[in-house]
Amino acid sequence: MSARPKKKVIITCAITGAIHTPTMSPHLPITPDEIAQQAIEAAHAGAAIVHLHARDPKDGKPLQDPAYFREFAVPIKAQSDVVLNFTTGGAPTMDIEERLQPALQLKPEVASLNMGSMNFGLYPMVGRFKNWKHEWEKPYLEESDGRIFKNTFKDIQYILESCKANRTRFEIECYDIGHLYTAAHFLERQILEPPLFIQSVFGILGGIGPHPEDVMQMKRTADRLFGDDYVWSVLGAGRNQMPIATMSAVMGGNVRVGLEDSLWDGPGQLAKTNADQVKRIRTIIEALSLEVATPDEAREILALKGGHNVGF
């Protein structure tokens, strides 16, 4: 009797993002060189996909200038075969045209896309820190109690249709059950094409919680809405990262880790690199008798256009 093939688990690593600020961890990559180096290390550790934001090298402020994305995308592509995934979320303070430009101009294989407008509460973090490195950081977090991340149906359709000619596929970020129904709406209208890459997000204040029942409800709903027409992945914010990733692997899903989503490598211990988190989840995946997908295997699973068809 031949052995059944092992399930291939796609690891996405989110290298740096708009949630955390530079003073929260000295290990968060800020400059294009730092972002590129950490992405390459994460790829070598087992990440099939790296999810990328850009920051102003002077003060770490989130930005969406395609020139900065090009600065780190070119060396990442040259030194690894990892799939590059650019954000269209950017930061809640940006308008849609600004958020769209890196994906539109540089034509990556994958871009992230939030499936709705939502409260995005970062303000509880303010009380955890006393020393701020830059003037923008504390107000950025404090003012999130009155800030909405905006992605209307019109915005989502605009991003999807703008990038259609690029053949960029999307990491469909779903922060709540209703976001799955929004994805199903665009799939029914044939504005999204299968297989959908559904990234379920848990533990952000304003979205679904991190309880195991929440994870299972997301999976049950996605199964019912999409059947075989989707690939499921999860990310857990903060201390929820590894438990929720482990749940996904056990349930047949894929995982996202990285310093954008959690600064930690264990209780009270900051992760020194993104590769640390990739190695940790890879150890868990392999302990479950599963295999980590290579970038080319991820390309096949997600029906991507290939790294030679990008604009950088």
Image: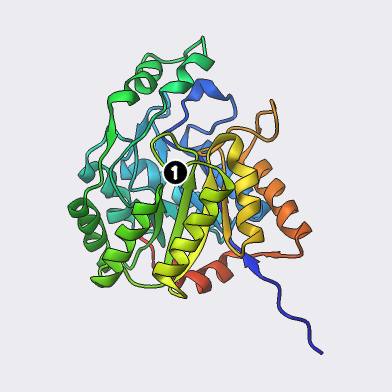
Residue 253 is situated, as x and y percent measured from the top left of the image, at 58, 62
Residue 309 in picture, x, y percent from top left: 39, 68
- Relative horizontal placement of residue 288, taking residue 198 as reference (left or right): right
Q: Nearer the viewer, residue 307 or 239?
A: 239
Q: Residue at x 71, y 78 (%)?
A: 5
Horizontal side, residue 305 vs residue 246: left or right: left
Image quadrant where residue 120 sits: top left
In percent of the image, x 71 and y 73: which residue is there?
6
Q: Position of residue 289 (x, y in %)?
A: 76, 64
- Give the x, y percent position of residue 231: 49, 66
Residue type at mark 1 is Ile
Residue depicted at 39% across the width and 59% down the height: 108
Disc 1 designates what residue? 208
Asked which colour scheme the image uses, the reply is rainbow
Q: How many marks?
A: 1
Query: Depth check: 119 or 279 in front?
Result: 119
Quarter containing the C terminus: bottom left
- Is residue 296 visible in the rendered structure shown here? yes
Instruction: Note whether 218 is above or below 280 in the view shown.
Output: below
